[in-house]
Image (cartoon, rainbow, N blue to C red):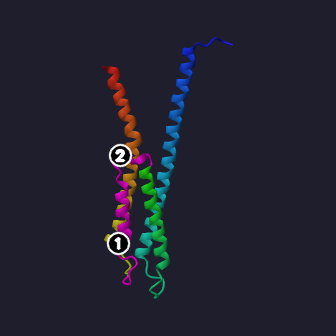
Amino acid sequence: MPDLSLGTWIVIVVGWIVVNQQNNARETRKELRARLDVVQAWTFELVELAIGYHTDEPKSPDKYSNKYQERRIKSRIDRVTRAVSALGRSTLGKRLYRPTHEAFYFRQAVTLHNFETAEYKPQAPDSELVENIAMTAQSLVETLEEAYSERYHLAWLRRLRLWCRSTLK
């Protein structure tokens, strides 16, 4: 058995700790990326449901004909806003976290006008209401991506700049 000095053991232990921390950080980043992807898929699914609801003629003359679609949309929008809030409480929320505001605007775009009313009117596919739903959904997705990039990509770049400055001095 080779004779390993105390310094060698310290290097081995410190190396293991560093590698373990980096692996944990990578796994956390991958899990967060997967959660973001799911929220984005839910958001675009909700956009399709909402646009279908707002542009379709009522299926029957009964005033409750859209109740099923309204319940589906409300439950899906609750799921999206809860997931966005949960992401804010996770590692994405370390700084200013705007996606919760964007989720609020998205909810408003879907449910504020022509939703759960007795005077339901089908909208044209190019109406302002339909365009607003699509734009706020895209804004929500972009702010989630921006928060992710600021948390992981820009932090890495800042650390690299600091390291370069400290070594070049």
Q: Residue furthest bottom?
A: 61
* The C terminus - image quarter: top left
Up-down relation of residue 54 to residue 11 (above or below): below
Q: Count every numbered label the image shows and give the total.
A: 2
Residue drawn at the location 35% of the way across and 72% of the way down: 112
Residue highlighted by disc 2: 95
Name the residue at 40% across, 43% down.
Answer: 151
Which amino acid type is shown beneath numbered disc 2?
A: Arg
**Residue 126 appearing in the image:** no
Residue beneath the point at 33% across and 72% down: 127
Q: Amino acid at mark 1?
A: Leu
Which quarter of the figure has residue 105?
Answer: bottom left
Which numbered tag is attached to residue 136? none
Can residue 33 be seen by looking at this rendering?
yes
**What x and y, as percent, mark residue 89?**
43, 51
On the image, the x and y values in percent for residue 128 come to 31, 70
Point out residue 101 in the picture as x, y percentages from the top left corner.
34, 58
Q: Is residue 95 left or right of residue 60?
A: left
Q: From which residue to which does the magenta span run?
A: 90-119
The image shows residue 111, relative to residue 151, as above or below, that is below
Q: Where does label 1 land, which residue?
A: 112
Q: Dot 2 lies on which element?
A: loop
Residue 28 vs 133, above or below: the answer is above
